[in-house]
Structure formats: C-alpha cells, structure tokens
Amino acid sequence: MFTKMKNIDTAFRYIRGFTMLVIVSCIIICCYTLYKSFTTVTLMQDRVYILVNGKALEAYSSERKDNVPVEARDHVKTFHLFFFTLDPDDKVIKTNVTKALYLADDSAKRVYDDLKENGYYSGIISGNISQTISIDSINIDTNEYPYHFKCYAKQNIIRTTSILNRNLVTEGTLRNVSRSDNNPHGFLIERWNTIENKDLGVENRK
C-alpha cells in the first residue's frame, strides 16, 4: 500500500512539474506574441499604402526636411507647367494661370499682368496658338533659406503652320508656407525672374 502511495505521489509530482512547464511555456509564448504584435503595429504606423492603377504602393512617413529637395523641385515644376501651358481658350488660360499664381508671390503676378497688358494672351487666342513646356532640370540650393532655385526648360509654341522652340531659364527663391489644397507642397515662389528666353529654331508643320 505504501508503494502505491509512493507511486501516486511520484506521478503527481511529474504531472505537477509538467503542468508548471506548460504554464510557463504558455506565458513565455504569450509575452513574445504581444511583443511582436506591438512591434509590428509600430512599424505599420510608419507606413502608408497607396492604391495606384490597381497596385498597392508602400509609402514611408518621414520628416519634412528629408523631402525638401524633392517637394521643392516638384513645386517649381508644377508652377512652370501651369504658368506656361496655354491653349487658345480664355477659360483654360485663366484656370492654369490662377493655379500657378497660388504657388508664387506678386513677382509672378506682375509678369502675368505685363503679358496680359501687352496682348500676349489675346494673341494666343486669336492666332489659335498652343504653348507647352518641358522641364529639363531644376537646381535647388537647400543649404541656405530661403531656398534658391534655377529652372531649365524648353518651350514649344505651336502655330497653324510651324512650331517655335524656345529655351527658358528662370530663377527665384522658395519660402515655407502652410499647406493647402491650392498649395499642397507648402512653398511659395518669391523673386521669380526670367534669366533667358531665346528662340532655338522653327519647325514647319506638315
């Protein structure tokens, strides 16, 4: 009888030991799972997925200073595309120029007023002329604020019988402002000036 009691006591100790081992293992696994979950959530909060043409593209959050050169170049590019893309339609001209003027100060407004006063936009409408621009490069100096830029571009002035190609070089500075729907990059172009705008040649249209 004592042998049976001893065997039962030994079995009970084994079972108790095994149970404690299982409990400790479960606690360790739960703690590890919670740790990995919090780590994964933290990492996911730094990521944004954007759906483009049916594909999910991953975007990473970062400080603005890390994106200043990229955003500044896109701001300058957007301004020039709006300001210099013209068609023989008064509404199109007003829409594009209005969008451009949200991105710059009165230095751009003065250029627009001068062109309008000199009949430039009226000539585009009456002559059925279209104007396009392609940006070659944009240099941004982010070492000193406000940021100085130079924009190198090509203009195409499309007439009924010919296409006039022009070289365009402009410069100015960029100042930080609040972001908005009209100014998503949060920059304002100041002291905008055209350095060069000369004809490169004329192509006859077929």
Image (cartoon, rainbow, N blue to C red):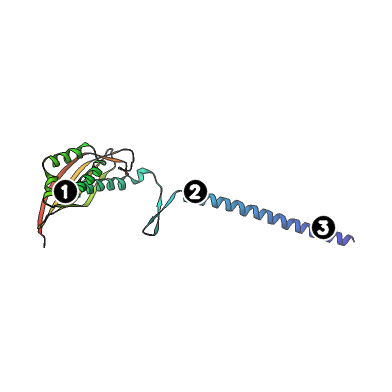
Q: Identify the disc placed on residue 155.
A: none
Which residue does the numbered mark 1 point to in the structure image?
168
* Foreground of the two, 4 or 152: 152
Which is nearer the N-term, disc 1 or disc 2?
2
Secondary structure under badge 1?
Answer: strand
Which is nearer the N-term, disc 2 or disc 3?
3
Q: Residues within 10 Å of mark 3 (few under 14, many from 20)?
A: few
The image quadrant of residue 21 is bottom right
Tell me the amino acid under the disc marked 1: Leu
The vertical placement of 194 against 133, above or below, is above
What's the CA distance linking mark 2 and mark 3? 49 Å
Q: Quadrant of the C terminus?
A: bottom left
Q: Is residue 163 left or right of residue 18?
A: left
Q: Residues within 10 Å of mark 1 (few under 14, many from 20)?
A: many
Q: Position of residue 128 (x, y in %)?
A: 13, 52
Which residue does the numbered mark 3 point to in the structure image?
9
Q: Is residue 15 left or right of residue 205?
A: right
Contact, mark 1 vs mark 2 (Cβ under 8 Å): no
Which residue does the numbered mark 2 point to in the structure image?
42
Q: Quadrant of the N terminus?
A: bottom right
